[in-house]
Image (spheres, helix red, strand yellow):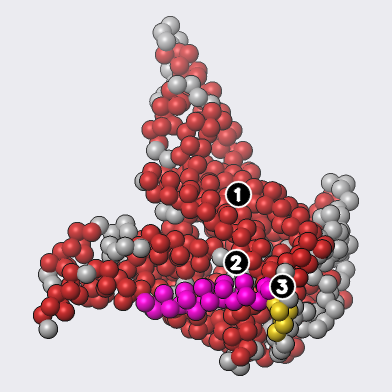
Amino acid sequence: MSATATAPPRTVAAPARRDGVRARRRRLLVWIATHALAIALALMFVAPVVFIALTALMTDQQALTSDLWPRSWNWENFAVVFEKSMLLRWTANTLMYAVLGTVFTVVSSVPVAYALARFRFPGRRLAFLLVITAMMLPPQVIAVPIYLVWARLGLTDSLWPLILPLLFGDAFSIFLLRQFLVTIPRDYTDAARVDGCSDLKTLVRVILPMARPAVAAVALFQFFYCWNDYYGPLLYAGVEQDHLTLSLGLATFKAFHSVQWNLTMAATLLVTAPVIIVFFFAQRVFIEGVTLTGVKG
Amino acid sequence: MASLADVWRRREGLRALVWLSPWLAGVAIFFIYPLLSTVYFSFHRYDMYTLEFAGLDNYRYLFQDPRVLTSAKNTLWLVVVLVPATVLFSLALAQLVVRLKAGAGLFRTIFYLPSLVPMAAGTITFVFLMNPSTGPWNQFLALFGIQGPDWFGDPAWSKPSLTLLSLWSCGQLVVIFLAALLDVPRHLYEAAAIDGAGPWRQFRSVTLPTLAPVLMFALVTNVIYALQYFTQAMIASRVASGSTDSPGSSFSPGYPDESLLTLPQWLFQVGFRDYSMGYACVLALLLFATSMIFTLILLRQFRRAEEAS
């Protein structure tokens, strides 16, 4: 479009063009406003992490003042955290809980979700109702009797009371997988059936390859749930320092080193960093998993 | 035995039962048995060593325990303020991200990441940021001439402080809403625009109705999570008061002034710190009843959504 020297003919096109300019200007203003708002909000979302990082690098005296910028950069604070706490031990404990918990959950929940999504049988609705109820049940409701059982077995003061039950399937994972599996057209499994596949073969050869994103999401969610879990470990492993998980350890760390905000913040960063790193490698799985929980639910 | 193989092939119910049996065993061991035991223990005095029949004493005590009322009030606050605030803020944020043309991916990542920060780490961070005298948050407010309160140390502000924490970590809900917003058919907006509908009118007549099931789902699940509210409150109390929590310590749950005492917190204290297992079971049943009511509401919602799709 080039500007012409001659006046435009008096038609409806002229006001339309003027409207077009106005609309374009308005769109530009809206563009600027939305992006400015987004930038402001993004800064507020990032700010806590920046302040943590800055504080983590201060000396302990400075961390108690209202200074926001470190006067000297004390990178050794991170080393001090490792010295003063059992961070490596806590990481090992957390890793054991998260890895075993994830493996157990996937292995035990996939068959249940498969049966709930694919088989027609009386009581199917009831079984699904049971899954949802178990998913919504606050863990505190049944904590006392279960705790007493593990105490009698002598397994308190360890993470086993949290890991072993996952061998029997996890309600949230079953729910998520079932929601995904019902969307796979029946034709695929019917074709397998005609070809003489057993149920197990159908699951392994047909369903699982198609359900890979859902299984990945479930695994990742379970891993992070265990990694970040606070209530469970507090109940069973919350006494001795060398039994703690990262979440627990972090919360007690502050209490033991109550004036040393710099070390507490350094520890916080060290606990958070792996989560963020994993996110950047598995972004798609996270996002797909979250959408799966909300929208298809 | 051809007939047995025949039965196996034809009886889907039988095969389903075999597939489900490990899980059903789990349900019996980790759900039905403990639930029945909870009812049984609730009629007893039990400190892990001596078990003594107590009749309805534990239930009667429920009505004399001032902490039950306190925790009910705190939970109500969370349900009425924290949950709607978080859901509405997430929806607004999703709306904003949907409109972004430049850097949408970057903004989405920035808004999502805090929700991955371990809750323990996030809570400790906020207690630090909102430290009344030295924390950056009050210094920021001072730039505008606002004298910030004693956030986590003031019973009137401790729950609002946790609400800010939950707004910061609302990324998962944002992603859910974002997906739902992208599912709204474009042509509906065009039709509405031709009919002369402004942005607000478009939101009310097009976006909201399409979003209603997801919105409802988010509200109810978040209410159920509010009933379970534990970790953030526990850690905030513990860190802000500077005390340790170990069995037998004189840690007062819900610091400051029981303003963060939720029912799960009180249950934990009663059962696993004071070892009044019987009374803890009464509290557990109260929590169970409340959660079931909301789960049923959720289920109805869920069925409606499934019928719609």
Discs 3, 1: same chain: yes
Q: Please tell me whether mark 2 sits on a helix, a strand or a loop.
A: loop
Q: Main secondary structure of the magenta part?
A: helix
Q: Which residue position is annotated with label 1?
A: B87
Is disc 1 surrounded by few (<14), some (14 to 19) or many (20+) residues within 10 Å? Answer: many
Chain under disc 1: B
Q: Can residue B181 be seen?
A: yes
Say whether residue B270 is magenta: no
Q: Where's residue A270, x and y in %?
A: 65, 77
Left or right, residue B289 beside residue B24: right
Screen quadrant of the N terminus of chain B: bottom left
Query: In the rendered structure, which amino acid carries the disc numbered 1?
Result: Val
Please tell me the numbered disc located at residue B33.
none
Q: Which residue position is annotated with label 3?
A: B55
Left or right, residue B173 beside residue A233: left
Q: State the extent of the magenta-drawn residues as a range.
A: B21-43
A177, B19: nearer the viewer: B19
Q: Can residue A73 be seen?
A: no
Please tell me the numbered disc located at residue A138.
2
Discs 2, 3: same chain: no
Q: Quadrant of residue A211?
A: bottom left
Q: Please tell me whether mark 1 sits on a helix, a strand or a loop.
A: helix
Task: State how far apart marks 3 and 1 are (Cα).
Answer: 43 Å
Q: Residue at x 45, y 16 (%)?
A: A16
Q: Residue at x 43, y 6 (%)?
A: A10
Q: Earlier in the sequence, mark 3 or mark 1?
A: 3
B229, A19: nearer the viewer: B229
Say whether residue B42 is magenta: yes
Instruction: Give the vertical position of B75 relative to A105 (above or below).
Output: above
Among all residues in the image, which is located at the extreme bottom?
A154
Instruction: Give the vertical position of B261 relative to A247 (above or below).
Output: above
